[in-house]
């Protein structure tokens, strides 16, 4: 089933946008997945103040999207494993002995 993403202005009219080639297009687009439609709506609302978005599935409202939520999703700080702090390493064991790194050599013959 297709998902339709639509951008509305403050007066609930469909927003029209002028493309680089001079052609005017309505901000309506069709998607196969609701996640793709939500990402598209988020990008459009980030650039257009006083607008809201709606995602419909077969003419039935699926999700209403406001601009504040879109901006929050776009500017969300990513939390990955690379930015987590690790505990500092210690050269002492918990029961009081100290540990040093050793090197072993094995003969080949």
Image (cartoon, rainbow, N blue to C red):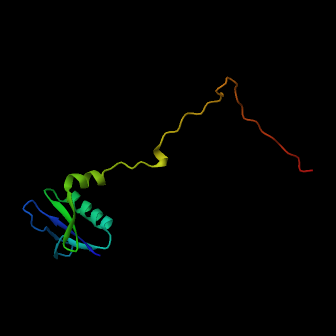
In the rendered image, the residue lying farthest to the front is 60
User: In the image, is residue 83 above or below residue 70?
Assistant: above
* Tally of numbered discs: 0
- Answer left or right for 5 relative to 36: left
State the residue at coordinates (12%, 68%). 14
Residue 15, position as x, y percentages in the image: 13, 67
Residue 10, position as x, y percentages in the image: 9, 59
In the rendered image, the residue lying farthest to the top is 96
Residue 64, position as x, y percentages in the image: 20, 60
Residue in front for this viewpoint, 65 or 104: 65
State the residue at coordinates (11%, 62%). 9
User: In the image, is residue 100 above or below residue 51?
Assistant: above
- For the N terminus, which image quadrant? bottom left
State the residue at coordinates (9%, 67%). 13
Residue 38, position as x, y percentages in the image: 28, 63
- Answer left or right for 109 relative to 15: right
Looking at the rendering, which quadrant does residue 63 occupy? bottom left
- Answer left or right for 99 relative to 18: right
Looking at the rendering, which quadrant does residue 40 occupy? bottom left
Looking at the rendering, which quadrant does residue 20 occupy? bottom left
In the rendered image, the residue lying farthest to the left is 11
């Amino acid at each position: 089933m297709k998902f339709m993403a639509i951008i509305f202005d403050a007066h609930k009219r469909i927003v029209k946008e002028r493309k680089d080639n001079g052609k005017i297009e309505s901000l309506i687009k069709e998607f196969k997945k609701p996640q793709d439609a939500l990402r598209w709506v988020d990008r459009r609302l980030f650039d257009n103040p006083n607008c809201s978005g709606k995602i419909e599935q077969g003419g039935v409202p699926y999700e209403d999207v406001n601009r504040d939520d879109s901006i929050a999703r776009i500017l969300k700080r990513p939390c990955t494993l690379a930015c987590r702090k690790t505990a500092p390493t210690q050269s002492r064991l918990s029961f009081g002995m100290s540990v040093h790194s050793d090197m072993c050599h094995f003969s080949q013959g």
